Amino acid sequence: MGVTLRYDDLDRLAAQTIAQRITPWKEALTAANADLAQTRWKNYEIGLKTLGWLAGATEVYGSGGAQAAPASAWIFPGQLWVAWQAKSAAEPDSSVSTHDARHASSQLRLIAEKRGEQPPVGSFTALATPQSTISHAARAICQDHVYLVPLHAAVDLLTALERAWTQASSRGSAIDEAGVLATLTAEQCLPSQWMRRLTSQRLNTLGADGVEEAQ
């Protein structure tokens, strides 16, 4: 007997959205690959926005040039918000600063103020950076919903989504929610799957450096 898979509402929402986007995806994928391969923050931000579109978020937007805004926000209404802060140009041997920790901690609040509603339970901020340490002061003020995400994580997710979209688009007009769910599951890129990867390292539990940062 075959195994009957159970999908939650978040996974189904992403699959429904992707099923409607299959046709125009190739050009977006090519651009995202180029943008996420760069460390220049503006390109990386554009790449994150496209990645959210490919991941099935129903609303995706960037900072719009506002310094305090998230680099990208992925909205799955009533299910999940993902705020991205991109520090792609940071020096790998530097530490996450109090400024960046405070900025990352404010991202969900800024989205909530913009939308006039509270974040769904489980929403989080992903700090994409090559850094691997945090200052003592930054760790003390960083909120629990902020996670350190290595730069390759976005590229890894894009690669998995490329495989899933390629398989789904090969079905042509016959593609539907069930077909998208099956391909996303096989490539480990359902939201419930990539969430676990992106939230594996809470920023305020990261090993602190030995530098006392000035306040």
Image (cartoon, rainbow, N blue to C red):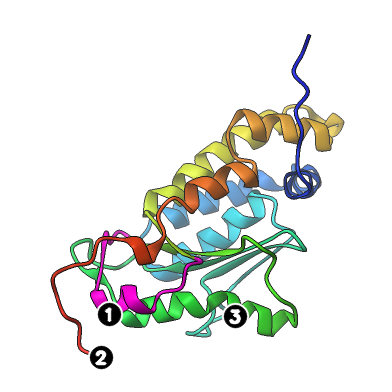
On residue 137, which mark appears? Answer: 1
Q: Position of residue 187 (x, y in %)?
A: 59, 31
Residue 142 among those drawn in magenta: yes
Rendered image quadrant of residue 74: bottom right
Q: Position of residue 53 (x, y in %)?
A: 66, 55
Q: Secondary structure at mark 1?
A: helix
Residue labelled with disc 2 = 215
Q: Tell which residue pokes out farthest to the left in this image.
A: 210
- Disc 2 to disc 1: CB gap under 8 Å: yes
Nearer to us: label 1 or label 3: 1
Q: Nearer the viewer, residue 69 or 28?
A: 69
Q: Amino acid at mark 3?
A: Arg
Which residues make up the magenta segment?
Answer: 130-145
- Disc 3 to disc 2: CB gap under 8 Å: no
Does residue 197 sit above or below 165 in this rendering? below
Residue labelled with disc 3 = 109
First in sequence, mark 1 or 3: give its number.
3
Q: Nearer the viewer, residue 157 or 117?
A: 117
